Image: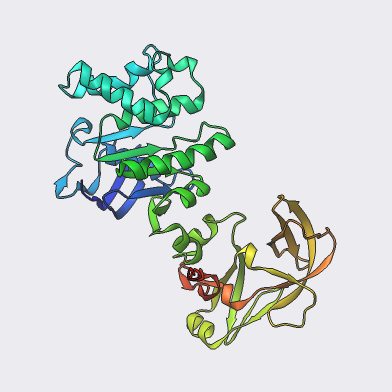
Amino acid sequence: MADLTLDHVSKFFDDDGSKVVAVDDASVTIEDGEFLVLVGPSGCGKSTTLRMIAGLETVSEGQIRLGDDRMDNKPPRDRDIAMVFQSYALYPHMSVRGNMRFGLEESTDMADGEIDSLVEETAEMLGIDDLLGRKPGELSGGQQQRVALGRAIVRDPEVFLMDEPLSNLDAKLRSQMRTELQRLQEDLGVTTVYVTHDQTEAMTMGDRIAILNDGELQQVATPLEAYHRPANRFVAGFIGEPSMNFFQMEVHGDTLADDSFTYSLSPESEDAVSGSEHVTLGIRPEDVELVADGSADHTYETTVDVVEPMGNENAVYLDFGDESRFVATVGGMRRVEAGETVYAHIPEDAVHLFDASSGDALKNRSLESVELAEPEPQA
């Protein structure tokens, strides 16, 4: 076992003589046994990155290494990698047993008895041991997904690659399979690179997440670091649902201003934006507080436009009476009506500030108020 390293990896495609950059100078090291999730919008380069690791796409620039062993100049069969595809890619004419043993028959000299024993052991672990005689067409989506996983597991690879393997499942089964995949990966301890456009999968499954946009790696961090300490405005807006609220502000010394409101800054925040004429102020919906009156600093009179009940919480869309709209989330038992006038408090310790031109984070929220308390000592 060893670390998987992408070292300044780029991928270019030719489009009638024009160079199209799919992945631009991506560098990341995935530690041995780590679960890394590549996440980003459609067309950001995440699947292309996965395919370069697998050897299904050539690397235009840079290197891919497993430990000290360079991989990008090897054919796929020599990379000791197993891949699970979005479509599962099962052979329809073969049974579950045949699908799971096929790779071992083609790539190893294991005896038939050894292969059968390994297939049956893996099938039992995945809860599909009673399905070994069936064909893929006789299976549900969740069962097919387990067969695809089993086919990868029996190969005992150095690295698992998973390209949106849950996207064909319904919401409830997808949630269940997220948990099962995490448990399985922890039990096996195999380095895993998982591609998804679903930020919920990224936040709940990954030891770390790598966020891509337009082929460029934006940030590699733990899910909570990316959520609370985004490297730039793109990461801040992509991670989280509802998305972070953004306001385009002009800097006037210790005050930010737009057409709707002004926001006074502490000395620390003023230092963070010094030298900038324009910044973006960001605040997560759950950090916007609806309060009884407008007496406190950073509190503004707003009008409720739309309320979206979610059961455990309500998404409350607020506006200042013009084009400026933002979202607050409140508890599901709190009654808020459209058209109602409410006061929104935007606490400074929860505010993010970004450079308006580059999008880079100038100041992220304070984490003092969200640190987990130490457990009470046991008597």
Decide if residue 316 is on the left or right side of residue 92: right
Query: Which residue is at a point 77% across and 79% down the rendered structure image?
Result: 294
Along the line of sight, which residue is nearer the eye, 183 or 252? 183
Q: Is residue 87 above or below residue 7?
A: above
Decide if residue 345 is on the left or right side of residue 106: right
Query: Which residue is at a point 29% across and 55% down the rendered structure image?
Result: 27
Q: Is residue 149 above or below residue 374?
A: above
Q: Position of residue 149 (x, y in %)?
A: 37, 31
Q: Position of residue 145 (x, y in %)?
A: 44, 29
Q: How many marks on residues?
A: 0
Task: Tell me where residue 264 sits by quadrant.
Answer: bottom right
Q: Position of residue 269 (x, y in %)?
A: 53, 82
Q: Position of residue 324 (x, y in %)?
A: 71, 65
Q: Is residue 17 visible?
A: no
Along the line of sight, which residue is nearer the eye, 358 or 228? 228
Task: Tell me where residue 136 sits by quadrant.
Answer: top left
For this orientation, the residue located farthest to the top is 93
